[in-house]
Amino acid sequence: MKKKFLAVSMACLLSLAAETGAADKIAFIDLTQMVEQLPQQQEVVRQLQAEFNSRASELQSIERRAVEKLKKLERDSAIMKASERMALEKEIAGLREQFTSKAQHYEQERQQRQLAAQDKLMQQIRQVAQRLAKQQGYSVVLDASVVIDAGSAKDLTKEVIGVLKK
């Protein structure tokens, strides 16, 4: 829905700009290609993995303990006292609750950090694209995902990547 609105808005903007003669030169950039090729993105992925590896290990440890307790309950429930069985069931429920809580917190924090890093990278891309467009006299720069037919529009993707790799 958001992309459709953006595409329609851009089409209206382009038609208006064409009527007024304001958009003489149009360029586009492929954000998806840039994100895949930029070393900054790969560095962000490495940093996030390093930061969240210990937390993932902690979740795996909790899960292993819960599975071990569950196997013990299944294996020994027939010979356990009722109080022992209830205590073990309570411990398993506690481990499940702990796992769920930590997993949700972990996922939320990971997503927040990932979005913050992505926003920072997009800001860098935007600044470079704007600077190149201004230097080369382009009045409109679009994301390739909203361009249906590039026509005479110039692809600035490689140039932006080149500047950001320096």
Image (tube, rainbow, N blue to C red):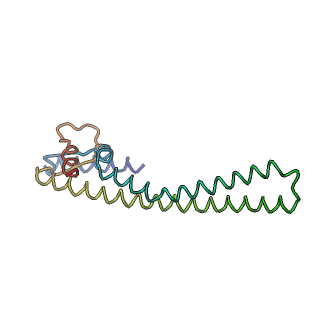
Q: Which quadrant would residue 63 be assigned to in this image? A: bottom right
Q: Nearer the viewer, residue 97 or 145?
A: 97
Seen in the image, is 114 located left or right of residue 130?
A: right
| Residue at (88, 59) in percent of width and height | 81
Measuring from the top left, give residue 7's x and y in whole percent. Answer: 33, 46
Q: Nearer the viewer, residue 13 or 98?
A: 98
Seen in the image, is 105 located left or right of residue 26?
A: right
Measuring from the top left, give residue 64's x and y in whole percent. Answer: 65, 52
Task: Establish if 65 lies above or below 146.
Answer: below
Task: Establish if 94 lies above or below 38.
Answer: below
Number of numbered discs visible in the structure rendering: 0
Q: Which quadrant would residue 153 be assigned to in this image? A: top left
Measuring from the top left, give residue 76's x and y in whole percent. Answer: 83, 51
Seen in the image, is 126 located left or right of residue 89?
A: left
Measuring from the top left, give residue 40's x and y in whole percent. Answer: 30, 53
Task: Establish if 32 lies above or below 83.
Answer: above
| Residue at (86, 63) in percent of width and height | 83
| Residue at (44, 59) in percent of width and height | 51
Seen in the image, is 120 located left or right of residue 89?
A: left
| Residue at (73, 58) in percent of width and height | 92
